[in-house]
Image (spheres, rainbow, N blue to C red):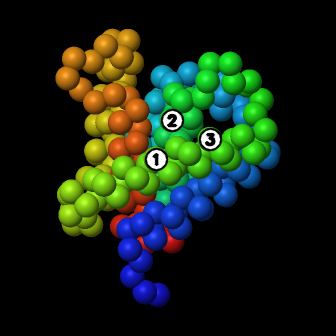
């Protein structure tokens, strides 16, 4: 199979994540709308910490694949971004079309950010270890938790939105490096 460009790979992986997310929306509705941002952050921490534990120990006792955990990180980051940007009066139960539109809007903004940063950083992530990417996700999570704990009153730090966007892109990079298509 030929080498995919980063934008092509991003589109392919996000289509996979989107398909799973919309299938879960069919099954569960928009139960995720109940989650407050700190709960989404904690769910992301659980996923990233599991990946790190498996990376460190080399032992996996639960069948869920590590790649699926990175997919979950992508989707939970998109949940966080949707929760940040949906109007306050958005109903708990959203139509599948409204969910797809919100998901697509956040994924498109993330794609734009990924391409801009990828240009400026020269695809340096391709030389990174997946374990380092996991550490970066965990570091971003600790930053977000700190920002949440101080009520988002950051003096010089990036917003929680920027952190969610970076974590989403890190998870995409990890999937690419792990050979996912």
At x 60%, y 45%, the residue is 103
125 with respect to 9 (left or right)? left
Q: Earlier in the sequence, mark 2 or mark 3?
A: 2
Q: What element carries label 2?
A: helix
Q: Can residue 18 be seen in this view?
A: yes
At x 47%, y 37%, the residue is 44
Among the 4 quarters of the image, the one containing residue 20: bottom right
33 with respect to 96 (left or right)? left
Q: Which of marks 2 and 1 is nearer the N terminus?
A: 2
Q: What element carries label 1?
A: helix
Residue bearing the label numbered 2: 81
When the figure is inspected, residue 132 is found, relative to residue 49, above or below; the finding is: below
Among the 4 quarters of the image, the one containing residue 27: top right
Residue 102 has which mark?
3
Query: From the viewer's perspective, is the residue at label 2 or at label 3 nearer?
Result: 3
98 with respect to 107 (left or right)? right
Residue 28 place in picture, x, y as percent: 77, 39
Residue bearing the label numbered 1: 109
- Rate crowding at label 2 as few (under 14), some (14 to 19) or many (20 or more) other CA atoms within 10 Å: many
In the image shown, does 54 or 118 lie closer to the viewer?
A: 118
């Amino acid at each position: 199979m030929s080498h995919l460009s980063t934008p092509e790979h991003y589109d392919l992986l996000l289509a996979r994540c989107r398909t799973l997310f919309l299938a879960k929306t069919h099954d569960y509705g928009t139960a995720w709308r109940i989650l407050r941002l700190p709960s989404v952050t904690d769910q992301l921490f659980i996923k990233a910490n599991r990946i790190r534990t498996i990376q460190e120990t080399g032992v996996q006792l639960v069948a869920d694949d590590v790649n699926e955990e990175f997919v979950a990180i992508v989707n939970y980051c998109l949940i966080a971004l949707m929760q940040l940007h949906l109007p306050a009066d958005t109903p708990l139960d959203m139509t599948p079309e409204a969910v797809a539109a919100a998901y697509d809007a956040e994924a498109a903004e993330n794609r734009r950010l990924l391409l801009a940063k990828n240009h400026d950083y020269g695809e340096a992530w391709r030389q990174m270890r997946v374990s380092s990417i996991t550490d970066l996700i965990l570091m971003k999570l600790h930053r977000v938790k700190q920002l949440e704990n101080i009520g988002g009153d950051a003096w010089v730090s990036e917003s929680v939105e920027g952190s969610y966007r970076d974590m989403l892109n890190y998870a995409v990079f990890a999937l690419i490096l792990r050979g996912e298509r």
